[in-house]
Structure formats: C-alpha cells, structure tokens
Amino acid sequence: MIALAFAAAALGWVGRARGLLLLAIGVGLAFSAVRVVQGAHFVSHNLWSAAIDWAVAAWILAPMMPADLTATLGRAQRTSGPHA
C-alpha cells in the first residue's frame, strides 16, 4: 500500500498520495497491532518491515518522480490551505 502512495506522487496526484499514505499507515498499524497481540510478531519486526517496504518503494519509484515534486507539493499546500 505504501507503493501506491509513491506511485500517486509520481503521477502528480498529491492529494491522493497523501490519502493513500494515511490509509497505508492506518491499515499497517491495525494489522501489526493484531499480530503483536496474537504473539506472532514483535513490534520491532513490524517497524523493520515498514521501513523495508518504504525503502523499496522509494528506490523503485524515485526515478519516476517529477523533477519539480517539491514545487508541486508546495502548490498543493497553498491551494488546499485554509486561506485558499
């Protein structure tokens, strides 16, 4: 699910990328909490898994990101802010 957020950012869909990232983090937290409560994983296993997923998604999708991604993100923040 983290890869979907990176893919949306690569396509310039900033709002969708943020929503997908929040969804991925929320679902990941819920699933990992269940596995920790079941005794199947340690918290550190879940954190390492999330870090590895993030790194692989960034490594694969970084070349596809627009060159002006920071400018795109800045524009999105200015247009979606409370004073827009």
Image: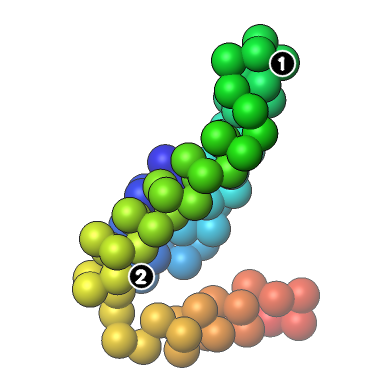
Q: Residue at x 29, y 64 (%)?
A: 59
Q: Residue at x 29, y 70 (%)?
A: 62
Confirm whether residue 52 shows in the render: yes
Q: Which residue is mark 1?
A: 37
Left or right: 27, with 13 as reference point: right
Q: Quadrant of residue 82?
A: bottom right
Q: Position of residue 53 (x, y in %)?
A: 40, 47
Q: Nearer the viewer, residue 43 or 13?
A: 43
Q: Is residue 83 above or below residue 21?
A: below
Q: Residue at x 29, y 79 (%)?
A: 66
Q: Which residue is mark 2?
A: 12
Q: Amino acid at mark 2?
A: Gly
Q: State the SS at label 2.
A: loop
Q: State the SS at label 1.
A: helix
Q: Is residue 41 above or below residue 38?
A: below
Q: Quadrant of residue 26?
A: top right
Q: Amino acid at mark 1?
A: Val
Residues at circles 1 and 2 in contact by the CB criterion of under 8 Å: no
User: Label 2: few (<14), some or many (≥20) within 10 Å?
Assistant: some
Placement of the C terminus among the 4 image quadrants: bottom right
Q: Disc number at residue 23?
A: none
User: Label 1: few (<14), some or many (≥20) within 10 Å?
Assistant: few
Q: Position of residue 10 (x, y in %)?
A: 31, 67
